[in-house]
Amino acid sequence: MEEIKMNPFNPKTMTNNPLNNPDHPLHIKTYQDFLADVNNPVVMPTLYIGGKPFLEREHFRVEIHQYTGKHDEFTIIVSDEVVDDFYGFLMRQSRLLLGEQFLLNFHQYGKVIQSFQGIVTHVSNKKNGDSGTGDLYITASAPSILLENGKNSRSFEKMTVEQIIAEVCKNYPPEAKVKVIGGLNTKNSLDYTVQYNESDYAFLTRLANRLGEYFYYDGKQLIFGNRAQKQITLSEGDDLAEVSFDLKIQNQNFTQYVYDEAFGDVFTHNADNTFTPPKDNPILGTAIQLAKKTFTQKSSHYSSNFTMGDEDSDARYKVPLYKEKLQHMMWVKGKSRNPLLKSGSLADMYDINGKAMEIYRILEITHHLDGDTYWNEFVGIPDIFVSPYVDENAFAKCEDQPAIVKDNNDPQGLGRVRVQFIWQRPTNEYSPWIRVVQPHGGSGKGFYFIPEIDEEVMVSFENQNAERPYVIGSHYNGKSKSGYHTAGNDKKVIHTRSGTKIILNDADGSVFIEDPSGNTYLMDGQGNINVNAPKNMTFTAGENVNISAGKNIITNAGQDMNIGVGNNMSTNVGNDHSVQITNNHTFNSNDYQQNVKGNKTIDVGGSLEESTSETTHRAKSGDILMQSAGVAQVLGKIDAKVNKG
């Protein structure tokens, strides 16, 4: 190891012994000596790339950017000649650093006080054209960069935040796995969560923002949750070099309207009736009270970005987050010389007089190290548990797209279906129960056409929210054709899966109705109606049945015909009435009366026998002629008389 050349008369490098003491000669400390010196306050780095010491004999500058909800970056700036040969090809050695493991340690007082692990993702060579030399920027990203796996789409149904994170990270190496540490603002399972065309990191960041959670890298592990890091004291006149506080006020009064489709009703949530924990920071607490006093008008807004089918319950959780967002009215920015500070730390600040300036959570920090000079710049807020980046509109945005119906037996009878999008097929995931747009609807009425299982439908999304799909129509495709195409687009058809159909044909103006048994009803468009039933046909009327024909009525029965009349029956024939009976004709009645205006002729091929209790034949005018081909007899049991009267 090369010894650091230092001024031997610099008291920082001298021992406590006189220079001329033969038992304790002057000793020039090596770099390793300074690293191990428990009294050394200087922040000193050690760097490893690919598991091996790197630049251990060279001077380099360090810039480290730590964020919340964004990839941390660690940059080393060194002369390019240190890594790449001046006479060699461009970036011949430095380009090979890409993808290597990166470890940067900060040492102070004889121990490692902070470590930053990552992967080299960027190498930049900025040259001076006149000299041919320049600086090499070697940048590593936190292991969270491995979660940038390209666009990915999937859904999670009835899973907790921890379960979702575990599912997302299950195939990643240990350094890229996200740890749920500390409390979560969301403890219940989420009914339906969608990752759509976004990397795993973008999804988890958006999920954190939507739920008001902190998501950051502490230098060693990725953390999801509101657990803060160690509390660090910063004091003016010591390690707090510069600090500024920004305080504002904004309207805190609002009313949120939520439509819950399960109840078919609108629910109202007011800020005044929504509980949020009191703020520990008295400065922020004063700002909140003054904001309420200043802004007296209450805003009102409607949001559809809640869990579908359980909107009111979801709003009871998310409305407080919106209230917390409005209460983020204080920020602190500063510079310090304390190397222990990092993203997630709690900075306990004191002014030059030793008075408390309250505690702030560090959201972002940039570390600078150049030689023996270290400083950092930070941004913080007084709220420890709810992220200031909370965004109730941080949902996956989705365009209209086709899907396949997988279930249509809605347990609540609301005419909903479950569908499977193309991107859900690899994991066999489904949507929740989603509504179907109908031409008409209402309580106990409407147009009730629910798509069949395995049919293709077109799905849209409320406000483009991927977690709020609904069916807007059905599709034909190459595998599922209608079978009713005509060149003139003549047919309009309703055809169910059983074979029941209604065909409206504009080519001939006909209407055809058919069921699977073969029952048909045809209005042929030419003034004719043809009704056919392979078996039985029944007509039932609560009152009257009127049948009217401009010309003829023909009734044919293949076997028997029965006519039953509960009261009177009248038959009016405008001209002739003919009844033909092949075999017997039986007529039964109480009284029987025939009125013939003209002549009556009875022609009996066989015998005529009439039996009555009493018979009277009277000719109102003219004669009575009784004639037989044989003997004519008039018999009376007592007597027989023929009188002139």
Image (cartoon, grey):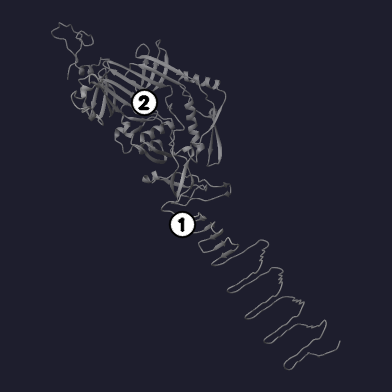
- Given residues 314 and 102, the one toward you in this image is 102
Instruction: Kindly identify which residue carries mark 2.
Output: 67
Tell me the element at label 2.
loop
- Asked if 35 appears above or below 583 in the picture, the reply is above
Q: What label sits on residue 404 in the rendered view?
A: none
Q: Dot 1 surroundings within 10 Å: few (below 14), some, or many (20 or more)?
A: few
Q: Amino acid at mark 1?
A: Gly
For residue 95, side relative to residue 506 (left or right) = left
Q: Amino acid at mark 2?
A: Tyr
Instruction: Kindly identify which residue carries mark 1.
Output: 483
Measured in 3D between alpha carbons, the distance from the residue under mark 2 to the one under mark 1, in whole angstroms, is 60 Å
For residue 633, side relative to residue 504 (left or right) = right
- Given residues 19 and 296, the one toward you in this image is 296
* Residue at the front extreme of this rendering: 488
* Residue at the bottom extreme of this rendering: 631
Q: Position of residue 355 (x, y in %)?
A: 42, 12
Q: Position of residue 448 (x, y in %)?
A: 54, 50
Residue at the spot x=69%, y=68% of the render? Answer: 566
- Image quarter where the N terminus lies is top left
- Given residues 214 and 140, the one toward you in this image is 140
Residue at the spot x=71%, y=73% of the render? Answer: 575
